[in-house]
Image (spheres, coloured by chain):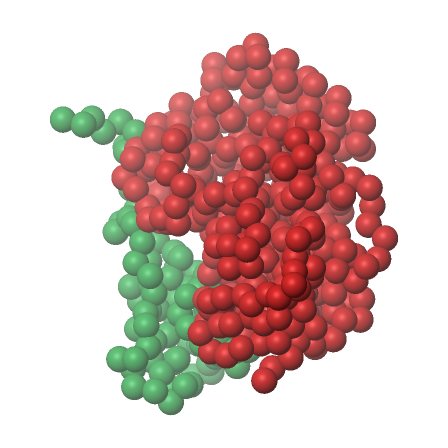
Chain colours: A green, B red
């Protein structure tokens, strides 16, 4: 299967070829790649792509995977409708 | 020991733009250092809007010249991707009589400077954004050449163009101290090395004050946290950025399909905190539910925050320094450094190379605060 047919991030439709091109351009941390390709910015918040990309970075840099940081975890854990938050009462 | 013609501190949009223009004008041995990675600071955290509807002359001029650049940026920088420049306007809501009066004056000022903004009634505004709550505002202003640029990709476009012109970048390198002697710069000391130079550009964004202190230069700016959220992507439903100063909201659908929205935290402490808060989410969702109820039906998927670097008059400091030769400053943008970046780089490259600088740009000098020459104050800030 070709690199450009392998989807790494399903939320933002990013392929393995996209990620490898980014690495070649010198972006070798998840946070840098995220800002260029949007990996980890979609509704699943990197739950699928983070480990795959971590492994790709480790391979590219020839480092053990545990030395490669994954993405920054941000709120929310799951998508919530804005008007539901607005309507929720404090008590 | 490394020797450089200039050390630019900060690879945010102001540092990148200035590096590009300096190299384009022929300066060699330019070094840009950043303590983190590309897009890690305020530029990569901003709301991605670009507008010309300001309340001060200087901000209007800076914005207009910058938008003119965004329109031709891909070509000029030979960027192989799109910077996602979208010109669908900014719609700014007035919610009371006082704001309505101020906006009338703003439009007169903007028009006098060649910015094509117009004053709109509620009915006219609804034609542009039909899902606005008609009871949430009394009038609006609109400028159809305002819009959106992707900050990550705009930064990358400058970064790659500057690199092609020979600019050297060093990431994950933090400036720890600046050595001076007889009002001249000697060295920049980082966590990795010492660099000999006689010129520095302080483009450190949220940390501009601290860099100033290292050089013994007092810069009257502070940093404060501003929060922002993004929704799931949806069909194209809103052209312009909708903004209200009194309701404390800006909200735009970006070309990707998601909505970005943010607000100011009243009385935010002056510090470098950039953690997301529950309070922001609570207040933001209430405001958007009131003004844009259709948008409030979307799911929020992420929140984050970044620093505004705020100046006393909410206009940037683009300046040299009287008491320290070769020390240049680009800070205090008060939340709008991204959208003023092209003209920032143009002005600073002229100053640094000793070229002719236009008169208006001289008014952005840091000495305006010392000499009580501050005549204008920008109110149009969220």
Residue under the point 49% across and 72% down: B190
Q: Which of B285 and B310 lies nearest the eye of the viewer?
A: B310
Name the residue rendered at 78%, 27% in the picture: B111
- The relative height of residue B256 versus residue B88 in the rendered view (above or below) is below
User: Quick one: which residue is furthest to the top in this view?
Assistant: B97
Horizontal side of B236 relative to A6 (left or right) equals right
Name above or below for residue A10 compared with residue B240: below
In the displayed structure, A11 sits above or below A50; it is: above
User: Which residue is at 69% across, 59% downward?
Assistant: B325
Quarter of the N terminus of chain B within the rendering: bottom right
Q: Residue furthest right?
A: B356
Residue furthest out toward the front: B182
Q: Could you tell me if residue B204 is visible in this image?
A: no
Would you identify the image quadrant in which residue B201 lies?
Answer: bottom right
Q: Residue B94: x and y, percent?
A: 56, 19
Q: Quadrant of residue B282?
A: top left
- How many marks can you see? 0
Compared with residue B325, is residue B137 higher up or lower down, i.e. above or below?
Answer: above
- Residue B211 % position (x, y): 52, 57
Q: Quadrant of residue B333?
A: top right
Q: Could you tell me residue B273's position as x and y percent?
A: 36, 48
| Residue farthest to the bottom, as pictured | A62
Q: Answer left or right for B3 relative to A67.
A: right
Q: Using the image as rendered, state which of residue B271 and residue B99 is in the foreground.
A: B271
Closer-to-camera residue (B182/B348): B182
Q: Is residue A64 visible?
A: yes
Q: Position of residue A48 (x, y in %)?
A: 31, 67
């Amino acid at each position: 299967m070709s690199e450009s047919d392998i989807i790494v991030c399903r939320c933002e439709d990013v392929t393995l070829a996209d990620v490898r091109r980014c690495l070649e351009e010198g972006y070798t941390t998840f946070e840098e790649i995220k800002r260029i390709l949007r990996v980890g910015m979609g509704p699943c918040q990197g739950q699928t792509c983070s480990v795959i990309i971590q492994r790709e970075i480790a391979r590219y840099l020839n480092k053990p995977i545990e030395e490669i940081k994954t993405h920054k975890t941000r709120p929310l854990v799951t998508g919530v409708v804005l008007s539901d938050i607005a309507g929720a009462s404090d008590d | 020991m490394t020797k450089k013609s200039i050390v630019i501190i900060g690879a945010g949009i102001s540092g990148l733009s200035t590096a590009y223009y300096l190299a384009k004008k022929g300066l060699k041995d330019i070094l840009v250092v950043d303590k983190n990675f590309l897009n890690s600071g305020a530029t990569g955290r901003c709301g991605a809007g670009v507008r010309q509807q300001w309340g001060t002359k200087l901000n209007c001029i800076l914005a207009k010249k910058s938008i003119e650049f965004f329109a031709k940026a891909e070509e000029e920088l030979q960027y192989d991707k799109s910077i996602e420049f979208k010109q669908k306007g900014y719609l700014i809501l007035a919610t009371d009589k006082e704001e309505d009066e101020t906006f009338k004056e703003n439009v007169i000022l903007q028009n006098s400077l060649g910015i094509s903004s117009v004053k709109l009634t509620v009915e006219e505004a609804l034609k542009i954004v039909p899902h606005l709550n008609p009871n949430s505002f009394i009038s609006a202003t609109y400028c159809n050449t305002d819009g959106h640029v992707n900050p990550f990709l705009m930064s990358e476009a400058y970064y790659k163009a500057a690199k092609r012109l020979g600019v050297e970048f060093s990431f994950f390198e933090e400036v720890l101290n600046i050595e001076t002697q007889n009002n001249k710069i000697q060295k920049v000391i980082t966590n990795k090395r010492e660099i000999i130079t006689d010129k520095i550009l302080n483009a450190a964004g949220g940390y501009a004050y601290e860099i100033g202190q290292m050089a013994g230069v007092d810069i009257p700016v502070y940093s404060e946290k501003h929060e922002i959220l993004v929704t799931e992507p949806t069909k194209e439903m809103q052209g312009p950025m909708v903004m209200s100063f009194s309701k404390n909201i800006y909200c735009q659908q970006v070309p990707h399909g998601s909505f970005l929205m943010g607000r100011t935290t009243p009385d935010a402490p002056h510090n470098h905190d950039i953690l997301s808060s529950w309070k922001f989410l609570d207040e933001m969702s209430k405001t958007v539910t009131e003004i844009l109820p259709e948008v409030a039906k979307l799911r929020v998927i992420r929140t984050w925050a970044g620093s505004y670097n705020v100046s006393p008059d909410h206009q940037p400091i683009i300046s040299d320094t009287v008491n320290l030769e070769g020390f240049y400053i680009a800070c205090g943008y008060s939340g709008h450094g991204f959208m003023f970046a092209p003209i920032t780089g143009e002005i600073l490259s002229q100053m640094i190379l000793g070229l002719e600088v236009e008169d208006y740009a001289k008014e952005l000098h840091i000495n305006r605060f010392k000499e009580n020459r501050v005549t204008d104050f920008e109110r149009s800030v969220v």
